[in-house]
């Protein structure tokens, strides 16, 4: 159902790799709600070509950008403002990658070059998105910037290794930049801490299926899906949440505040 929540709004959506990506669902919902936007992803991710389907469905131009490159982001904002005919009202940062996770490195055995890459791609890029946009005066007043996080920023999930540190940094950047952009431009910045979700990034994490089921059994409402995450993102892009900023917002069916559930107790008994 469409509520016209983003009618007339312009934005940038990063991170749609394939149909299971959270960003993919956000793009479809943003289109439904009346927004016009550009899509962006790392040039290497474009090679798979999947994003072209989304671009057609949303009538959205694709502007490639490696989110770790300030130059690419300058080009992204410049071209976006040209294509959209003005400044932007929303930005989705839906980007994460850890070479250590990909290569199965444990937290006590991290490769430091890869560790820096994890932080650069998954966290510093959020800062770069805001610093470049701010310097280029690309944000309209009351624009909304959203990043995606995971509860490993607050609690230990051993398999999440260096991405836990990246998410802690991402959430801190949301607060620090949110303060400044709030003061200077009335722009809001938040992160959404999402349930485990079956996507390319999610499924790359060791033991994903088991902890997906565990989280589902722990959450009174069950795990939040990618579609439901997209709905939540849309509310944050809309004018209905204008005074929400510098927050890390849990979108997890109640997982973050549950100590234990009957289902998990039952599972333990069966062992
Ligand atoms: N899937 C989950 O369980 C889950 C849970 C909580 C939070 N998140 C977060 O949601 C966000 C989106 O992930 P997803 O689950 O939709 O997976 P996904 O794999 O579909 O999306 C990750 C995206 O990051 C992009 N990316 C990687 N390196 C990049 C770079 N250098 N420049 C630009 N883009 C780059 C990839 O191309 C991809 O599109 C990530 O921040 C992820 O950590 C995911």
Image (cartoon, rainbow, N blue to C red):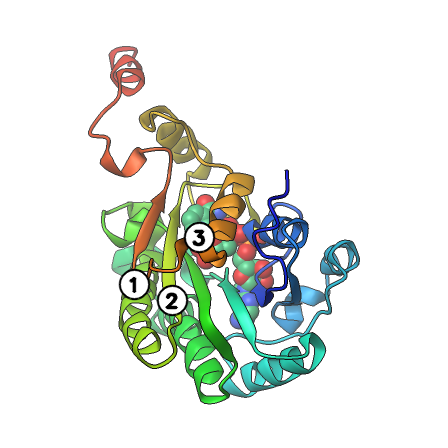
- Residue ID for mark 3: 240
Figure check: 247 above or below 29: below
Where disc 1 sits, the SS reads loop
Q: Is residue 185 visible?
A: yes
Q: Is mark 1 within 8 Å of ligand 1?
A: no
Badge 2 marks a residue whose secondary structure is strand
Q: Residue at x 55, y 81 (%)?
A: 73
Residue 227 image point, x, y percent: 56, 41
Q: CB of mark 3 within 8 Å of CB of mark 2?
A: no
Nearer to the camera, 131 or 49: 131
| Secondary structure state at the residue bearing disc 3 | helix
Q: Separation of disc 3 and disc 1 at Cα?
A: 16 Å
Q: Residues within 10 Å of mark 3 (few under 14, many from 20)?
A: few
**Residue beneath label 2, please?**
188
How far apart are the two marked residues, 3 and 2, measured between alpha carbons? 12 Å
Q: Is residue 157 left or right of residue 5?
A: left
- Mark 1, residue position: 246
Asked if marks 3 and 1 touch (Cβ < 8 Å), the reply is no
Task: Say which quarter of the image contains residue 78.
Answer: bottom right
In front here: 137 or 98? 137
């Amino acid at each position: 159902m469409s509520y016209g929540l983003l009618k007339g709004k312009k934005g940038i959506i990063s991170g749609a790799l394939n149909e299971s990506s959270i960003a993919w669902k956000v793009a479809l919902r943003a289109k439904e709600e009346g927004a016009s936007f550009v899509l962006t992803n790392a040039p290497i991710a474009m090679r798979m070509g999947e994003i072209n389907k989304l671009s057609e469905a949303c009538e959205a131009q694709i502007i490639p950008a490696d989110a770790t490159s300030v130059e690419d982001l300058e080009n992204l904002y410049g071209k976006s403002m040209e294509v959209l005919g003005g400044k932007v009202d929303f930005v989705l940062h839906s980007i994460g990658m850890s070479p250590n996770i990909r290569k199965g490195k444990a937290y006590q055995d991290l490769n430091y070059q890869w560790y820096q890459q994890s932080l650069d791609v998954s966290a510093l890029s959020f800062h770069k998105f805001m610093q470049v946009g701010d310097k280029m005066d690309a944000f309209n007043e009351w624009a909304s910037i959203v990043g995606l996080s995971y509860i490993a920023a607050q609690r230990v999930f051993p398999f999440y290794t260096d991405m836990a540190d990246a998410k802690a940094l991402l959430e801190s950047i949301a607060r620090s930049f949110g303060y400044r952009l709030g003061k200077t431009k009335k722009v809001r910045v938040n992160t959404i801490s999402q349930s485990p979700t079956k996507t390319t990034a999610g499924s790359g994490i060791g033991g994903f299926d088991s902890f997906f089921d565990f989280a589902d059994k722990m959450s009174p409402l069950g795990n939040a899906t990618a579609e439901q995450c997209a709905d939540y993102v849309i509310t944050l892009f809309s004018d209905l949440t204008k005074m929400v900023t510098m927050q890390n917002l849990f979108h997890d069916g109640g997982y973050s505040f549950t100590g234990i559930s009957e289902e998990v107790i039952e599972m333990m008994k069966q062992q």
